[in-house]
Amino acid sequence: MTLRQIKPGGRGFLYVNSHPEGCAAVVDELWKHTPAPVTATAPGPVALVIGSSAGYGLAATVTALRTHRMRGLGIAFEAPETERRTASAGWYRTARTAELVGADGDFAFLNADAFSTGAKERALDHLASRYGRVDYLIHSVAAPRRTDPATGEVHHSVLKPLGSAYRAKTLQFDGNVPLVGSQELEPATDAERDATVRVMGGADWRLWVDALAGRGLIHAGFHTVALSYVGSELTAPIYRAGTIGAAKQHLEDTARGLQRDLAPLGGQAHTVVAGAAVTQASTAIPSVALYTSLLHAVLGDGFQNTGRQAAVLWQQLTGAAPLQLDEQQRIRLDGWELDDKVQDAVRERWLAATTGTVAALGDTAWFRAQVGRLYGWDVPGIDYDAPSRTTVPWPTGI
């Protein structure tokens, strides 16, 4: 057993070390607040969750396992411990999730690059041999780069506006002091836009569905969803109207194509427009930190975390509640965020937010703590002065 004295390290919202006990406690909290099934007799359906170690993917996985006794496979791409650094936060979260499932569960975890052909082959071999067919595919992947499995070309995503430059209003911290500033962002080139679409669009989601169909692994009533976001007009220039927005549009176009292809098999495909959340992916987007801090200050307990949103999503996917579709056939989970009164209140605070006022207008301390929790820091009840067991094995699986 390796015990190490660790500190977060890093810069801005990026930490270089993760805390094992803190990451486990975050999963425990998510598990605790996820309802257990009313009955637990028959085995649950089979799900493949791509991106199961963080954000919405982690919440969808925990909810599926806890409430719906889901069987199947979760895929994540996480870094093991090295001499200089701890394992990644997702590594520790996955290990704890597997512990909570326990020996009675029937859900494995694969650590692999989901974009690769090899990961698809390993995953499908496992699913075919153990279950035969799959009921659900959840695609929740946010990545900075993707290697095209057909060409070997590496594409890099960028966070840029389209058409013209944009000055993004930002939130940073000097120690515990919140600072409101700005960041000038040059418009993306056509090549950068196209690369971002190749990384964050629907290409890989389509490959996964086609691979399942090609192996005869799609069960009658199969439903696949990919996570998307629309957000506020305040963040639109860098999000929905930017390079990521172009990728999300491609994702939604892909959903419509998959829906047509799956209909003869009795299947469905939708994008899921989730609400705002503090995730490792979202903290990298300029303006989102400030916006989310202000949004939480407006909503308080009405702010729906990823666990609450995942519970609503699974109710709809399993038929316990009807699908809440918009005119573009997207499942909407973001009504609480985009309510007109909520957005009016956030907009008023946004315009008034300066370094001198933001602590009163936004939940900046909450936001900073949420960022720490992504890596297992700032979790109540954890003794961060004590040495930690940082060597944690990946769950036994495939």
Image (cartoon, grey):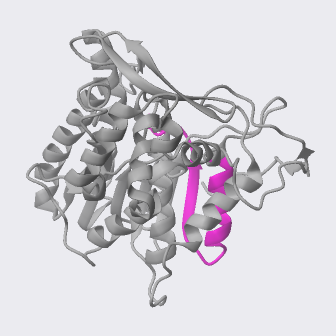
Of residues 203 and 302, the one drawn nearer to the viewer in this rendering: 302
Residue at (64, 70) in percent of width and height: 100
Q: Vertically, is 151 above or below 309?
A: above
Q: Vertically, is 171 above or below 276?
A: above
Q: Vertically, is 90 above or below 71?
A: above
Left or right relative to 211: residue 170 = right
State the image quarter where residue 375 is shown. Answer: top right
Q: Residue furthest left?
A: 327
Which percent across, then down, holds residue 314?
35, 68
Q: Let me know if residue 130 appears in the view.
A: no
Q: Is residue 198 magenta?
A: no
Q: Is residue 116 magenta?
A: yes
Of residues 265 and 331, the one drawn nearer to the viewer in this rendering: 331
Residue at (35, 25) in percent of width and height: 150
Q: Let me know if residue 189 appears in the view.
A: yes
- State the quadrant of the C terminus: bottom right
Which percent across, then down, holds residue 192?
33, 14
Residue at (56, 65) in percent of width and height: 30
**Magenta span:** 90-118
State the image quarter where residue 134 is shown. Answer: bottom left
Left or right relative to 237: residue 3 = right
Residue at (63, 49) in percent of width and height: 373
Which percent across, then down, holds residue 106?
55, 71
Of residues 156 and 343, the one drawn nearer to the viewer in this rendering: 343
